[in-house]
Amino acid sequence: MLRYFFRRLAMMGLIILGVATFTFVLSRALPSSPVEMMLGSKPSAEQIERAKVELGLDRPVAEQLGRYFFQLAQGQFGTSLRTGQPVIEEIGRRLSATAELVSLSLLLAVTLGLPLGILSAARRNRWADHLTRVLAVSGVAVPVFFLGILLQMTFYGWLGWLPLQGRIDSNVMLDHPVHAATGLMLVDSLLGGNAAAFRSALAHLALPTMTLMLASLATILRSTRKLMIDVLGTDYMRTARAYGADRRTIYFVLALKPTLVPLLTVIGLTYGFMLGGSVITEVLFDWPGIGAYVVESVVTNDYPAVLGVTLVISTLYLSINLAVDMLYFVLDPRISA
Amino acid sequence: MTNQIFSVAKAGTIARSLWLALAGLVLALSGGAAAMAQGDKPMVYAMYTDIKDWDPSIASSTEVILLSNVYEPLLWYNPNGGKQLFTPALATSWGVSKDGRTWTFNLRKHVKFHDGSRFDAAAAKASLERTIKLGKGSAFIWGAVEAVSAPNSHTLTIKTRIPVPIDLIASSQYAAYMISPAAMEKGTDWFNQGHGAGTGPYRVRQWNRGQEVVLDRFDEYWGGWKPGQVSRVTLKIVQEAATQVQMIRSGEADFITLPAADLVKTLEKNPAISVDRGPSWRNTQLLLNTRKAPTDNLKFRQALTHAWDYGTVVKGIYEGGAKLSIGIVPATMWGHNPQLKTPAFDLARARQLVESSGVAAAERRISIAYIGTSEEYKNSLLLFKSNLEKIGVQVDLRPGPWGKIWDDAKGRQNAANLITMTWWPSYASPSDWLIGLFRTEKTIDFNLSNYANPAYDKLVNEGVALEGHDKSAAAAKYSAAQQLLLDDAVAIFVADLTGRAIYRKGIQGVALNPAYDAVRFYSLTR
């Protein structure tokens, strides 16, 4: 198992190196120069030339790539051309905001998707199955931006229950400042015993979480259903039924356990995808996360930020994948044999 | 089986706990919503992007909303129609020597920076010298300055190499702010951590990156405070127009900035919302590349200026958000001349010019690059394309981001024949358009028409030298220069855009000032 782990780790390193090189070369091949964008609305030709020299953009691409890897080896991603802030700090800050949103959404999606998937499989082709199918298909079919706006109009515009956008109320932040320990607003406010900030953060999380959760619910629900149906059709399930095992044991223990391994892959990959794919939700709710950061960086050709985010997201995606694969050993002893 | 039953029971407990947690969440949220409705509400200004450059010597973009409330220049430019051209800010009086090269500003006394230090001539001198030395952002506006001196604690002298209007330059929305010397010592990195140290009515209280900037009133502001004025301002980042609209409808936002023309029309009908329209210095034009075939041909270019349906574009596409341009200097700026001889929409004349241009029928094809996200650009260019096709000119429309359009236009190979441009000046001078867009450039920066006419350059340079002490003589030079642009058909002058402010009714004191893309919260009450 350990040998497998180290082999996968080495492969991961190679992939990341490839991603870094590919993204770097691609960023240099883009038609427009990013420098003009960083210099304000009307930079002079001299200012542009000076900035290109300062950033080393006048050097050959191979030399720039060498410098970039040297910088990476020192744990630096450079400075964002758009915001003027160190990329690594911005990614750290924004990634925690995204992680909070995505984790909560996924937790909810799993909490709802698993039992509904099991229900759907158990009541196959009956009204409960059709109902959950409608729910799942709607979640996928309705575009995220439309779903988000619909929720905003209902819970903010019509009912007035929930805040529209942002991560926390500014008055709460002024009167009850949250000291960042983990970067997760809910955790940090709990750690500091800050009830007002916790409530406000939770209220602000509600709508984007619901939007993102509904979009990923279908994947988990339908995967659970499909896997359960496959397992429920096996001989040993028929044997279990013949022995008189009750329904709860059949569905939640005997059938669920073998579905967990492939399901874990689905959940892990969904999590990895959501980390980089929550762009629309973040923009819609002005959530200061990594998705919105990517969009702004790509649009302005802020290549240090684009490279940094690409590396971090791909590393995270690969790490989650690896962690899921390692969990197989725990969940299914046959694999380690 | 016991273990399995235990597992089932445990799974059931976990599921129940999760559902209980969900119920708790709903309860907690209603508490959160209740908490939202309480407490003093700050003035909320919804802006679409975060503050990028916090350094007032460098910032030259959307930061003006922050700069003009936290910092002050020597003079504020008054909106057109004001009795005087300027309102004293940190200078109480000023004058210029007979040769137009030495400007003296008497500075306001008893003024403090937000960090407690005193504003005086040494601080003013240091502010200007730092901005000039850094040479970033809009620092070029001080290009003619030879020396800055502080003969005594409240007198500032600015000497220039040639006569230039330092009073206008000192009222610029960028690169003209007075900064605390202690803050300047800390450097740009300190500013970019979300700090500020000006003399303005508001100080920076908090910056929640990517979310908002909170400004609190500066109690020791030299102008003093009256009841009803705004004590706290939140500059909130709201990227979506639809979200901004919901916020102003509900009263959560007091000002919004994004909505397109059709949404503004809907908002105007809302009794709780005011939409003010007023002067702006922004205008839109199509720059014609004079070096690239077939627009290197004068008659062909003139034909294009007659094929543009000026009236329909302004009335039907900008829908009250713009007025017809007459020349490059907008009607809201001094130096504008409504008597200029401008081309009219006339397809018969356009066809005649195309036919007599000498451009072969097979080569009558042009490319137009425009910012793809603008509905106004897209619709007016579709109309233009349709008209041009009627006179046998084929059009290739190339939507794209500004960065690419600009980069392509600066080169030869990928440059389009026409590109869209929206321009506004760095300070209140017609020369900003005339120099920035059309004066000969060795390395192309914004003269994207590639226009090079020594007669034009001479007129503009003479106008600049006159601006400081004889504005009417300068205006005459600028009129002659503009007529050259029209005769040489280097651009299609499309529209002077109208400024607008969208805010909640009940807010008093909102005044549109074309010189500043911002709201001065100190002037407001509610």
Image: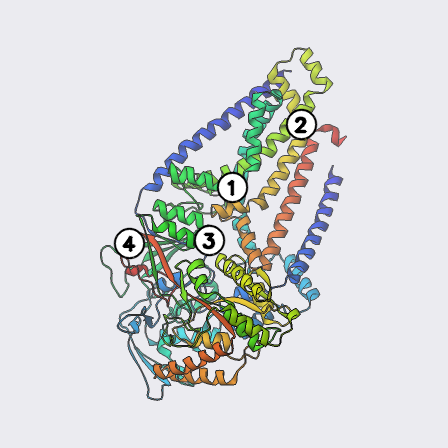
Q: Which residue is mark 4?
A: B507
At a point 22% along the width and 58% down the height, the residue shown is B226
Across and down, in percent, residue A314 comes to: 64, 48
Mark 2 and mark 4 in contact? Answer it, CB < 8 Å: no
Q: Name the chain under label 2.
A: A
In this rendering, the answer to whether B177 lies above or below B228 is below
Q: Which residue is mark 3?
A: B209
Callout in the foreground (2, 1): 2
The nearer-to-camera label among 2 and 4 is 4
User: Which residue has dot 1 on it?
Assistant: A101
What's the residue type where badge 1 is placed?
Answer: Leu
Is label 1 in contact with label 4 (beta carbons under 8 Å)? no
> Tag 4 or tag 3, which sits nearer the N-term?
3
Residue type for callout 4 = Ile
Which residue: 38% across, 70% down? B177
Q: Amino acid at mark 2?
A: Leu
**What label sits on residue A227 in the rendered view?**
2
Q: Quick one: label 2 or label 1, which is nearer the N terminus?
A: 1
B36 and B2: which is toward the camera: B36
Give a yes or no on whether discs 2 and 3 share a subunit: no
Chain on which label 3 sits = B
Q: Secondary structure at mark 4?
A: loop
Q: Is residue B32 above or below residue B16?
A: below
Q: Which mark is residue B273?
A: none
